[in-house]
Amino acid sequence: MTGLRRARRRTAVTTCALLTVVACMLPIPASTAAGWVGAENATGRFATGIVAPPTGLVCSVNQAQSTVTFSWRSPVGGLTRIGYTWDQSDPSPGGVQKGGVLGVEFRSYTFRPSLPAVGSGRFQISAIGPGGWRSAPLWGTVSRKQPLRGSTEWGCSVP
């Protein structure tokens, strides 16, 4: 071994010995009166379930007032609902995206379609459950036709 290696080894051994002596000289932690003596038991509930979607979506058109109404039945089963969320979308250029929340007592929604041109848009409704979880959506289509110049005819359908 070279002198440099011996010096490094000697330094390492001395350092380890010194750290061992210092660690042995540290005071032992004192006992404490604190302790954990009581069992902790959970008192809450945990349940799983699904947010059932509304059923029986139907639509109707009032040509005189240029409104479309989508109606549905309350979901059957599943977790308790706290309301419904709806979305109306128009994929055409300049189309409008709208949406909102309805109370659990609602069974229909009436609106004036926002289709700026001939074509179709989409309406969808979902139930909202605990924690804001949503059901799968039900959807329908709203369409705009112009059978005669200057006139507009609305239509709707549900698959």
Image (cartoon, rainbow, N blue to C red):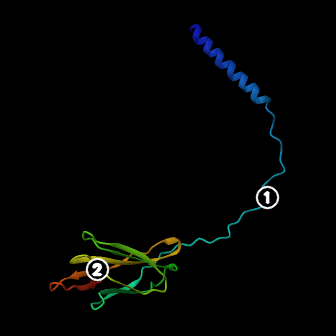
For label 2, the residue is 141
Q: Position of residue 159 (x, y in %)?
A: 28, 82
Q: Secondary structure at mark 2?
A: strand
Q: Position of residue 74 (x, y in %)?
A: 45, 86
Residue 5 vertical position relative to residue 38 in the rendered view, above or below: above
Q: Check disc 2 and give the amino acid type.
A: Thr
Q: Position of residue 79 (x, y in %)?
A: 51, 78
Which residue is depicted at the point 33% across and 83% down? Answer: 112
Graded by Cα atoms within 10 Å as few (under 14), some (14 to 19) or many (20 or more), the crowding at tag 1 reads few
Residue 66: which quarter of the image? bottom left
What numbered label is drawn on residue 111? none
For label 1, the residue is 37
Is 3 displayed left or right of 71 in the figure?
right
Q: Position of residue 152 (x, y in %)?
A: 22, 85
- Mark 1 vs mark 2: give the one in front: 2
Residue 75 vertical position relative to residue 132 in the rendered view, above or below: below
Which residue is depicted at the point 37% across and 74% down? Answer: 98
Q: Check disc 1 and give the amino acid type.
A: Val
Residue 91 vertical position relative to residue 138 in the rendered view, above or below: above
In the current view of this chain or complex, which residue is farthest to the front?
150
| Mark closer to the chain start, 1 or 2 | 1
Residue 141: which quarter of the image? bottom left
In the current view of this chain or complex, which residue is farthest to the top?
3
